[in-house]
Image (cartoon, coloured by chain):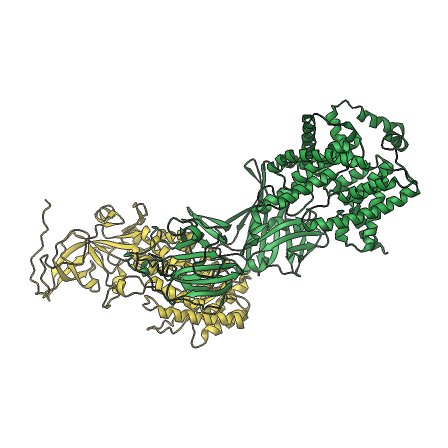
Amino acid sequence: MQKLKYESPVIQKMNAGLMNKFGTRTEYEPVTHIDGVSVNRMMADYGSPLFVISERTIRQTYQNTVRAFKTRYPKVQFAWSYKTNYINAVCKVFHQEGSWAEVVSGFEYQKAIGNGVPGNKIIFNGPEKTNEELTLAINNDSLIHIDHFEEMYQLIDLSEQLNKKPRVAIRVNMDTGIYPMWDRFGFNYENGQAWSALNKIVASGKLQLTGIHCHIGTFMLSTEAYAIAVRKLGDLAYNCKTQLNTVIQYLDLGGGLPSANTLRGAYLPGADTMPSVDEFAEAITNALMNIGFAAQELPLLILETGRALIDDAGYLLGSVLANKRLSDGRRATILDFGVNILFTSFWYEHKISPAQAFTHHTEDMVLYGPLCMNIDVVRQSVNLPLLNRGDKVVVHKVGAYNMTQWMQFIQMRPNVIMIDEKGNTHLIREAETLAYIEQVEKMPAHLQQINL
Amino acid sequence: MKNNTVIPFLKYIGSAVLNSYGMLFFSKNKLFSLLIILVSFFTPFAGACGLIAVLISIFAAHAIGFGKEQIQNGLLTYSVLLFGLGFGSNFEMGIAFVLLLFTGALLTLFLSTTLNAILNKRGLPALSLAFIISTSLLIIASKSFNGIGLTHRHIYWYNEMFSLGGNNLVNLIQQFENWSVPDYIAGFFRSMSAILFQVNIAAGIILSIGLFIYSRIAFILMVLGYAVALIFGYAMGGFESGNMSYYNMGTNFMLVAVALGGFYIIPSIRSFLWIMVVVPIAYLMVIGLGSITFKMGVPVFSLPFCITVILFLHMLQSRKKQNKLVLTPIQYYSPEINLYRYTNGKERLLNEYYQPISLPFMGEWMVSQGYEGSMTHKGEWSKALDFVLLDNEMKTFKLPGNLPEHFYCYNKPVLSVADGVVVEIIDNIEDNEIGGNNTQQNWGNSIVIKHAEGLYSQLSHLKKHSFKTVKGAYVKQGDIIAYCGNSGRSPEPHLHLQIQATPFVGSKTLAYPVAFFNVRENNANTLKTYSTPKEGNFISNIIPNTQLQNAYNFQPGAIIKVAANNFANEEWEVCTSIYNETYFYCKELNAFAYFIYKGTAFYFTNYFGPKNSLLFQFYEASYKVLLSNNIALTVTDYFPLNIFKPNAINWLQDIVAPFYIFIKMKFEYAIQQDENGLNNNKIGFTSKRSEILFGKQKNIKTATVTIQNGQLHSFTFQQNNQTIQALCSN
């Protein structure tokens, strides 16, 4: 018989409830395997902490999402939002599934090209695009989304220099009843800037107006906001056709679809409160069908969904470093990962499961990361079984933004592995080393020598 | 008459004359016609009479006011030619002869017109009946006229030859005549020449060569007809030689064989076998009718041939099912072309009569129950289709799967399969629980749409109160009409589609193909045209590309100007025929290219005219165009073999074509743009022609077509190892 785990005794407040011969129980179940691969095994092979990405989950989520739209609207295209997770292996899974690339910087643009995405299937967003980057995008016939008038004039200048007619769209922001209103990107709809931009683009004769883009916010909890956005974009597209004699070929609804994570401060778990992707698809496609376009002139619907497609596929595996009692009596557990690599713990109340068997006793506790920094809190308060040093935990739904917004701060970034559909693990990003981090540092000559 | 009207007029008279000669062998081949004229002058007097009679009838018909189309094809006048030849071979020259030739020619023309009118209405040919009646009449009547007498020229025909070509010609002819070939072979050539009222081996050989050039199949049929008659005759123990001339002996049977084996019937193994049955029937007629006409003092001529052919064709027409031993649908005056066109058209164009029906959903669904399904598609309701949505684990639902909402297809838009008027809606039935069944209201919420008289579609098991249309409304193909539900006899959400002939919910079903759809199998996509989705198929609609549609939706009256290096400029006008067929007409080259535009596809059906034209290159390049930019689809099709210049292998193929086709001309098409390509102003595709010889594929030609701003911009093709670009403009 396996030796029973020792748990240090603790005095708990009496919880009144129905008597139960099994005692109190937790909702937790140990997560010992991911896609059939042992968590212990992966951590033994690749170290702790460790990011794990499930290729099967990516493909399933992608196909389910695409199906939700394609069974409701004839022309749908997804473009993988690079900033959500631009590890090349991840991007390539999406590209294999048929996704284009949506990038917001020259760096991401180069990554997409490097991943083999044809230039004319790259959507170039973002407020900053240099002349060099735009020149490349124009020569590649990419879809350039204009963020401000300065960029529009910059493009007109470039198109004259290059004697090419770049394909462009404008980004539009609008009031969709969402707070806060994302009005810092693109041209505003209500104050007429968007219409003015469209007019100027067509009048310039230098640019090929191809589409209209919006991104109404992130982690949207209302489907109606999308319907409003479609109606407003549709209004612009319809006016372009009737007044500017220019057919808008696509409407890019951006991203913003939520994942099943629970936002900080939310009362109920995210999975229970979020509208399903089907509900979003229903709202978006219904509104599109009602713009007033004939069946054969319906614009292509582009979606830049990032988070909803990748969050579920990412796991973070880590180990317990220590336990302590805080001054107010709360239990604190210190883990070997913190906000440095789990950036989203600023936003979400991540679900964390132990990776091994545990008793039914649970306790509210704080989860801290390993940083010598006060902000490093993974969960402010979570009810978990008691964990000992060396125990393993699995953080769920961490695929989005963590592997792009993580920071090299105090600790170095760990390995990232992918479990393929056959259950094989592949290292897709190696843990950082001192040499890797210092290779870009330069030492002035007078500082070479120190004498302590 | 001005010069510019004289030449076309002469051309027209010329082709009328040539076709009159060709028609004797069911041909419109000009070269063969010239050979026949040459051979007819082996008996110069009869030959001249024939030519004169034809000219008389052509001018008479023209003067009476027959149209160019009626005269030019020679159908009215070939009987007159036969009359002239026959009359000239039987009577002596004199004033009475001239008068009778003239009168007889006119009589034959009248008879020919009337018989054609009477018989053609029933889809039967008049053949040479007019000639038989008029010539017999004249022979009988001539006995009362003293001014005309029978000639012996055809008995002493060497004399005529001598007067024509002196000793040399007679020697040459004699060499053929003394040629030591078995009688039955010489008999074949003599019978061949007897079609022109001669008994001359040399004439028979020349005609045989001409016939072979015109049609390999026709030649083989002639041999077959002759052989069958010969064997039958021997089996019957011979016959009284008095009644049998070479004409009777061979000609009737040979003509029967060509007419029924390959001309009025598409040549096939069946038609060849039937010849072996029908020729003996003709044989009986020759003997029987011959004995009767002999008593009246006239030969039986080709009467047995005419009666046998008309009887047999009439019998075939009276069948309920015409699928075996097919009557030639469109006469191209060549057994080969008839055969190639028919087999090609059977594969490509038979579905023209179906109204294009699309799938009633968006995205890719699976056929959960097909025609004659094992669950509910039975008996009179067997021609129905059920569709569901699956995930990549082949599940129709997401967990836990105990509510209709968990099923992927539930609440998905349902589309109209074609344009039409809503004639029935049932919209008050609750969805079943999963596993439930409502056999009381079997069809659940349903809609019936009328697309044409006797063509209705019914969609069933829809969601209550989800209808987007009302009874009496007009809906277009692809319009959302309702949402998928779980009402009626539906244990789990699915969509039921059936086509029916009556407007009621639950009418019995009608097998009807879906016009264009995509089937995905092992991640390979295949285009299906006019076929029925099978159970287990993953299918989706073809989404048309507006640019391609605009470019290929050629409107009557439109003119396309085309220019290319090494080619003269061409102007193609888009025209519509009286049968509502659309075609390009190139006036400069007198070329026609017939096409069909179906919204999702464009295809050429036929080409007439010179092959060294740009229009022909375009015909080849755009033989079949799928008007969709779904890159995953490759379209293949086959050309009729006769459309390209023949070579030796093709001739070999012609000979065995009724039994086995070993050459195929394959057409492949691939779009250059991808599925959601947004490039507004440019889209193109590549098409390839390759020859498949005994299953081995050899690429012959590659072409590309470029569409710009929704218009045909240019196309390229290969010729003499160089790529030529043709620019098009409106």
The N terminus of chain B sits in image quarter:
bottom right
Image spot of residue A363 (x, y percent):
13, 61
Visible residue check, residue B639: no
Q: Residue B412's image quarter?
A: bottom left
**Residue at (73% x, 27% y) in the render:** B239
| Residue at the extreme top of the image, as rendered | B180
Colour chain B is painted in: green
Which of the image's four quarters has the C terminus of chain B? Answer: bottom right
Q: Residue at x 66, y 35 (%)?
A: B648
Name the residue at the bottom extreme: A191
On the image, the x and y values in percent for residue B228 come to: 67, 30
Q: Say above or below: A159 vs B698.
A: below
The answer to whether any part of residue B162 appears in the image is: yes
In which image quadrant can residue B480 be found? bottom left
State left or right for residue B476 relative to residue A435: right
Chain represented in yellow: A
A131 or B505, which lies in front?
A: B505
Residue nearest the viewer, comparing A300 with B637: B637
Left or right relative to B614: residue B447? left
Residue B627 picture location, percent across and down: 54, 55
Q: Position of residue B287 (x, y in %)?
A: 73, 33
Please name whichever residue, A124 or B660, is drawn nearer the observer in this view of the structure. B660
Residue at the spot 34% in from the left edge and 64% down from the top edge: B430
Number of numbered discs overlaid on the protein picture: 0
